[in-house]
Image (cartoon, rainbow, N blue to C red):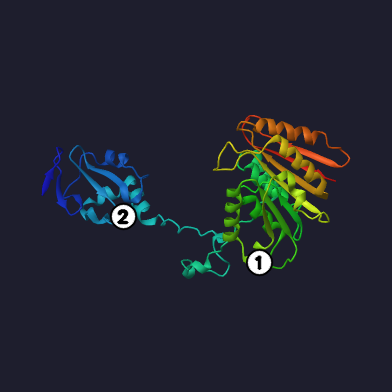
């Protein structure tokens, strides 16, 4: 197919575009100036003849211009484009980050999963958990669990005064016992039978039979803990989680009167260097009164023998609070 420009130049249709058949087009220099050489190699557009036809030139079709168009090829615009197409180096291959692979890996073994360095997530330190609590990323119970690790060692005796669903009890077992320790004891109690059943099931599912032997469960009020803990045993930690059973009846709650008796008992059985850890929930009826009682109890302890601390979110009045009573 042949097209004729209004300037008289004949053009012949070839595969992939138009080529000049003979002569010189009337507007070749202006077309060269309008040539855009900054586009990508595979998307360079150049006008061949004014208002009539357009040829698309790619790196694989530089042969479209015949030898009869040598005068256009000599133009400065086309010369720059030709050098751009033929001399521009290909893009470099992607850089492989050395820390993503083991030192012995090579390009031939990159796809091998064994060459990829695997790292385990390190356990959070007590400082990390505390900062997470400050930034609203960690719960009060997580802070309490983290602080217990600073006080409790393998072989110690601890008390879970309100075992609830058993999560505190399980954490305490892992702190005081392992397969190489014959000592270590957790005394866990709750006034609700369903709590003991839930805790027992969790322990059976999570612990080996040998570790399970380190826990004793009691259906009783926490104010009577001295009845089951031997008098000659030095207790390192006493844990309270005050409020109602999560997922249970909200009407069944810990009471200020019995909690006060339990705190007095915990103070008597606690060894020097031990800790009483209390997480108080205040968002339910009776919770605020119980918190005020615990705070008053802690405030009256002698400063020579006790260090008492409270962690509280000031702009979240219903958030649980942490009260820590450390015996010097």
Gap in angstroms between the C-alphas marked 2 and 1: 75 Å
Judged from the image, the secondary structure of the residue bearing numbered disc 2 is: loop
**Badge 1: how crowded within 10 Å, few (<14), some, or many (20+)?**
few
**Badge 2: how crowded within 10 Å, few (<14), some, or many (20+)?**
some
Q: Nearer the viewer, mark 2 or mark 1?
A: 1
| Image: 82 above or below 241 | below
Residue corresponding to mark 2: 59
Instruction: Name the foreground residue: 114 vs 13.
Output: 114
Instruction: Name the foreground residue: 195 vs 184.
Output: 195
Instruction: Name the foreground residue: 34 vs 149.
Output: 149
Residue corresponding to mark 1: 210
From this viewpoint, which residue is outermost toward the right?
304
Position of 268 with respect to 128 (left or right) is right
- What residue is drawn where x is 83% and y is 37%? 301
Residue 282 % position (x, y): 64, 33
Can residue 106 be seen here? The reply is: no
């Amino acid at each position: 197919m042949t097209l004729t420009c209004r300037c008289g130049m004949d053009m012949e249709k070839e595969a992939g575009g138009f080529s000049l058949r003979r002569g010189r087009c009337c507007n070749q220099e202006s077309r060269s100036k309008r040539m855009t050489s900054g586009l990508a190699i595979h998307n360079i557009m150049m006008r061949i003849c004014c208002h009539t036809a357009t040829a698309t030139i790619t790196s694989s079709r530089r042969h479209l211009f015949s030898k009869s168009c040598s005068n256009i090829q000599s133009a400065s615009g086309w010369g720059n484009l030709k050098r751009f197409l033929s001399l521009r180096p290909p893009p470099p291959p992607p850089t492989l980050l050395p820390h993503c692979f083991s030192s012995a890996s090579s390009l031939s073994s990159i796809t091998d999963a064994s060459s990829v360095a695997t790292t385990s997530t390190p356990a959070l330190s007590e400082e990390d958990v505390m900062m997470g609590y400050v930034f609203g990323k960690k719960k009060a119970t997580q802070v309490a669990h983290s602080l217990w690790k600073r006080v409790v060692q393998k072989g110690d005796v601890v008390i879970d005064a309100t075992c609830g669903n058993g999560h505190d009890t399980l954490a305490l077992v892992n702190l005081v016992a392992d397969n190489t320790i014959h000592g270590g004891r957790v005394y866990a109690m709750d006034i609700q039978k369903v709590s003991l059943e839930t805790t027992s099931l969790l322990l059976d599912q999570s612990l080996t039979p040998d570790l399970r032997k380190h826990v004793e469960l009691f259906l009783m009020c926490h104010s009577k803990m001295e009845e089951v803990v031997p008098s000659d045993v030095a207790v390192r930690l006493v844990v309270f989680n005050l409020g109602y059973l999560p997922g249970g009846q909200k009407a069944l709650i810990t009471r200020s009167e019995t909690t006060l008796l339990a705190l007095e008992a915990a103070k008597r059985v606690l060894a020097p260097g031990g800790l009483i850890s209390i997480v108080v929930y205040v968002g339910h009826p009776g919770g605020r009164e119980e918190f005020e009682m615990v705070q008053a109890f802690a405030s009256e302890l002698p400063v020579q023998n006790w260090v008492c601390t409270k962690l509280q979110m000031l702009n979240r009045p219903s958030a649980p609070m942490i009260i820590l009573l450390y015996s010097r």
